[in-house]
Amino acid sequence: RVGVDYAKHSYEEIARLWLDEFNKRAVGVGLIPGVLEAIRALHAQGRSQSVLSASYEPSVRAQCAALGLTPYMKDISGLQDESAGKKTEIGRRQLHELGLAGADVVLVGDMLADAHLAEALGADCVLVSWGHNDLKRLMSTGLPVLTTDCAWVPRLVADGAGLVVPVGDAAALAAGLKKLADNPALRHRMGATGRQHVLERHTWPASAAEKPPRSMSAH
């Protein structure tokens, strides 16, 4: 049998063990190369930056401190307890405490849930490709995607379908985020181009419509 016997172990006990292990390992994983330097550069430009998380706030604050993020953040918000909660509610609370409207914010996320969160908050959004969802899924949202120049990625985001920066280049990463944050028209154009690119080339109907290579054609 696979699973958990709640007669022997309560949900709270299992959740506590999982959270303890997650929090221990979260810091050990570290940040994407260049991210801390990019955050410092944006801070030096006078950019206001905050962290919004669906994790337990004291744990998020401890992680930010250990990773060197805290000095550059205006606010760090998470769950007020360790029960499940909606990130949207946390985001609304954070905006209220900062005296901001959704339209004042560009949310940087790495998964489809962040796209939905930005929409619910009335905020614009930039997605980065080194998180939970693959690049094509992110591009399908119609939001601008910032990614790195590893392997086949530059071909996928060619022709204005995304913004590519060199791996580990903090200055380029900061410049890319600033470029997107400062230019709503570019964000909207790039997002629309990326979505169209995925629909035309990377869906099952599009793949089925492609002519097979000569070596695979019937004779």
Image (cartoon, rainbow, N blue to C red):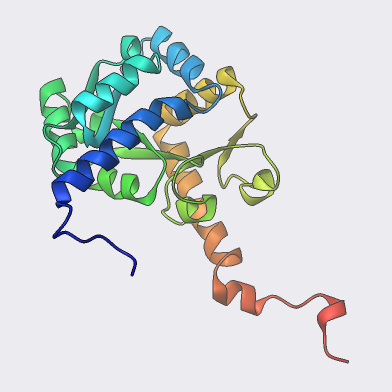
**81 sits to left or right of 212:** left
Quadrant position of residue 64: top left
Where is residue 54 drawn, in percent x and y?
23, 38
In the picture as drawn, the residue positioned furthest to the bottom comes out as: 219
In the image, residue 11 above or below residue 47:
below
Where is residue 109 drawn, in percent x and y?
38, 38
Where is residue 197 drawn, in percent x and y?
57, 58
Residue at x-position 22% and y-position 47%:
14
How many marks the image carries: the answer is: 0
Quadrant position of residue 46: top left
Question: Which part of the image, by quadrant, shows the N terminus?
Answer: bottom left
In the image, 157 versus 3, the foreground residue is 3
In the image, residue 44 above or below residue 150:
above
**51 sits to left or right of 165:** left
Residue at x-position 44% and y-position 47%:
132
Where is residue 65 drawn, in percent x and y?
32, 15
**58 sits to left or right of 218:** left
Quadrant position of residue 160: top right
Question: Which part of the image, by quadrant, shows the C terminus?
Answer: bottom right
Residue at x-position 40% and y-position 18%:
67
In the image, 107 versus 72, the foreground residue is 72
In the image, 66 versus 199, the foreground residue is 66
In the picture as drawn, the residue positioned furthest to the front comes out as: 8
In the image, residue 142 above or below residue 24:
below
In the image, residue 77 above or below residue 17:
above
